[in-house]
Amino acid sequence: MGVIYLIRHARPVHSGVLLGAMDSPLADEHVEPCELLVERVWTSPLQRASLTAKLLFPSHEAVIVQGLAERGLGEWEGMSWAEVKERRAEDAARALEDWFAFTPHGGERWGQFVERVSAVWLGVPRDGATAIVAHVGVNAVLHSLATGADISSFQQDYGEVVEIAIPD
């Protein structure tokens, strides 16, 4: 039996805004090493995740996986939700109607994002223990693929670990 640990990156410098694929550094680089015993560490290429992986697992060489980057939110990146509602009221209303059907201008379509993350999921080893350090959107998709749970119900705090047992 294998186990996969989905870990959300530590708190980024830019908080309170929609980050998407924006490459924000960490607010604090004093992240204690993790005590999880893992064979592999995979991480998003975005520095808030890749640095978290390095700090959590200093004795591992983390594998950077491009497909683990967070969904690009185009022109919304770096904006607070209040700013989106003020500057793009129609778009904000459409997004609230169906987040998964709406794509901000210049952003990545939800379906493309899910396909990208699903392709990564197919390559995740099912034996031993693998830590994946990524983002809440990525981890929501991975969790749904692994468990069948509804993506929209997934929640994860900064630095939180979600363990998924992979049966033989």
Image (cartoon, rainbow, N blue to C red):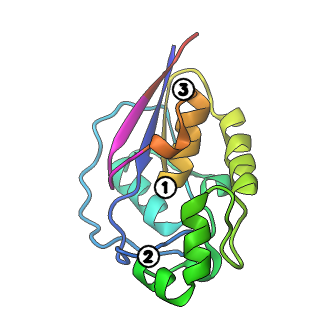
Q: Which residue is mark 2?
A: 81
Q: Is residue 104 left or right of residue 78?
A: right
Q: Which residue is mark 1?
A: 135
- Inter-mark Cα distance, 1 to 3: 18 Å
User: Residue 67: x percent and y percent?
Assistant: 67, 53
Name the secondary structure under disc 1: loop
Q: Is residue 63 left or right of residue 154?
A: right
Q: Which residue is mark 3?
A: 147
**First along the sequence among labels 1 and 3:** 1
Name the secondary structure under disc 3: helix
Query: Is residue 33 positioned above or below 2 on the image?
Result: below
Q: Residue at x 70, y 35 (%)?
A: 123
Query: Is residue 138 positioned above or below 92 on the image?
Result: above
Name the secondary structure under disc 2: helix
Q: Amino acid at mark 2?
A: Trp
- Inter-mark Cα distance, 2 to 3: 30 Å
Q: Residue at x 41, y 74 (%)?
A: 25
* Magenta-tinted stretch: 155-163
Q: Is residue 49 left or right of residue 67?
A: left
